[in-house]
Amino acid sequence: QVQLVESGGGLVQAGGSLRLSCAASGRTFSSYAMGWFRQAPGKEREFVAAISWSGANSDYADSVKGRFTISRDNAKNTVYLQMNSLKPDDTAGYYCAAKYGLVYPIEAWQYDYWGQGTQVTVSS
């Protein structure tokens, strides 16, 4: 069992930055690939970024490439999402997810555990 708790969301102006954190419980955090997803009101949950168990490999949605960076610290059981050059379209609830194993997929259904989410609001 893995419990995930996100933090770091908030209100920011367009062009600003935020760093989201996702703290995981358990001693096997390094066995899990991690992902970030987001969901805006009235829209489906969408993939944002994912990172392999070691942190050596990552993947990004086209909409955030070059602006967002996913990273992890296995010693701290934490995954991060650094978000720069934020746009109003980035406004959503952001969720981290964990998937046991080597694969770091972009499909939400493949993930085993989810956090409760943190809200990011970008004003124009």
Image: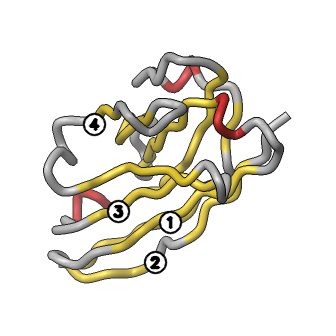
Does residue 91 lie above or below 18 as drawn?
above
Separation of residues labelled 3 and 1 (CA atoms): 14 Å
Separation of residues labelled 4 and 1 (CA atoms): 20 Å
Residue located 76% across and 36% down the image:
28
In this view, the residue in front, 72 or 109, is: 72
Indicate which label's residue lies in the foreground, 2 or 3: 3
Q: Is residue 91 left or right of residue 103?
A: left
Q: Earlier in the sequence, mark 3 or mark 1?
A: 3
Q: Earlier in the sequence, mark 4 or mark 1?
A: 4
The answer to whether the residue labelled 2 contacts the one labelled 1, judged by CB atoms less than 8 Å apart, is yes
Q: Badge 3 is on which residue?
A: 82
How many numbered discs, if any? 4
Separation of residues labelled 4 and 3 (CA atoms): 12 Å
Indicate which label's residue lies in the foreground, 4 or 1: 4
Indicate which label's residue lies in the foreground, 3 or 1: 3
Q: Residue 78: which disc?
A: none
Counting from the top left corner in percent of width and height, residue 111 is at 60, 25
Residue located 66% across and 22% down the image:
100
The answer to whether the residue labelled 3 contacts the one labelled 1, judged by CB atoms less than 8 Å apart, is no
Question: Type of residue at label 2?
Answer: Gly
Q: Earlier in the sequence, mark 2 or mark 1?
A: 2
Label 2: how many Cα within 10 Å (few below 14, some 14–19, many 20+): some
Label 1: how many Cα within 10 Å (few below 14, some 14–19, many 20+): some
Q: Earlier in the sequence, mark 2 or mark 4?
A: 2
Q: Residue 10: which disc?
A: 2
Counting from the top left corner in percent of width and height, residue 102 is at 53, 18
